[in-house]
Image (tube, helix red, strand yellow):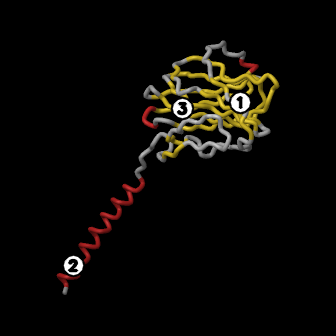
Amino acid sequence: MKKLLTISLAALMGLSIVAVDFADAARARVVHRGPRGRTVVTVRTGHPIRRSMHRVVYRRPSAVVRVAPAVFLPMVVWAPAVVARPAQDRMVWQDSETLYREEDWAETVFDSNQRGSRLFLDVRSGRVQFDFAEVVFENGETRVVDFANGTRGPGFYSLLDFRDGRRVDHVRLIARSKSSESRIALILER
């Protein structure tokens, strides 16, 4: 009986040591750049782009979207033109994102909620392939800019002009890095 009790206690102690090792292993975290799940880009009825949509990693699930697209204005086909950066005092808003090749296509929502007249795209590093952008204004009007899956390297590009000084609620951008890592930014001029 003593032998059985001794073996049982030894087995229980061995299990508790294994449990402690598992507890330590549970605390170790693997850090991933961005979310791991992929989903197909969803578009609303009336969206002007008719091609099949990419499977994307959704980069900013907590981005604030106050206004959903209600009316799609005529689509703009992007004609990339490198332009001069506006003076710092003319910039009312900017936001940036780093894209990684391993993620492939990514969907990023840039929360603006600012009034301006021109929107710029700044490829700060790497090469980026762009699908489309949706610029959603405060009244729900949405202007889709079609990049036609074009690839661009570093440069400061004009994205969209709206001379009437409109409030941009948010910008939704579908893109992927063709370099190991690419940095992009959106800038709104007053």
Q: Residue at x 56, y 42 (%)?
A: 41
Residue 175 badge: 3
58 and 94: which is toward the camera: 58
Disc 2 to disc 3: CB gap under 8 Å: no
Lateral position of residue 148 relative to residue 119, left or right: left
Residue 89 percent location from the top left of the image: 75, 19
Q: Quick one: label 1 or label 2, which is nearer the N terminus?
A: 2
Residue 170 percent location from the top left of the image: 69, 36
Q: Quick one: label 1 or label 3, which is nearer the N terminus?
A: 1
SS label for mark 3: strand
Q: CA distance from mark 1 to mark 2?
A: 81 Å
Q: Quick one: label 2 or label 3, which is nearer the N terminus?
A: 2
Tell me the kind of residue under disc 3.
Ala
State the image quarter where residue 11 is shown: bottom left
Residue 55 badge: none
Q: CA distance from mark 1 to mark 3?
A: 21 Å
State the image quarter where residue 95 is shown: top right
Residue 3 percent location from the top left of the image: 17, 82
184 and 6: which is toward the camera: 184
Give the label, 2 or 3, closer to the camera.
Answer: 3
Give the quarter of the figure containing the C terminus: top right
Tell me the kind of residue under disc 1.
Pro
Tell me the residue that label 1 is attached to.
Answer: 74
Tell me the residue that label 2 is attached to.
Answer: 6
Tell me the kind of residue under disc 2.
Thr
Q: Residue at x 68, y 37 (%)?
A: 111
Q: CA distance from mark 2 to mark 3?
A: 64 Å
Q: Residue at x 19, y 87 (%)?
A: 1
Q: Residues within 10 Å of mark 2 (few under 14, many from 20)?
A: few
Lateral position of residue 20 relative to residue 134, left or right: left
Give the label, 1 or 2, closer to the camera.
Answer: 1
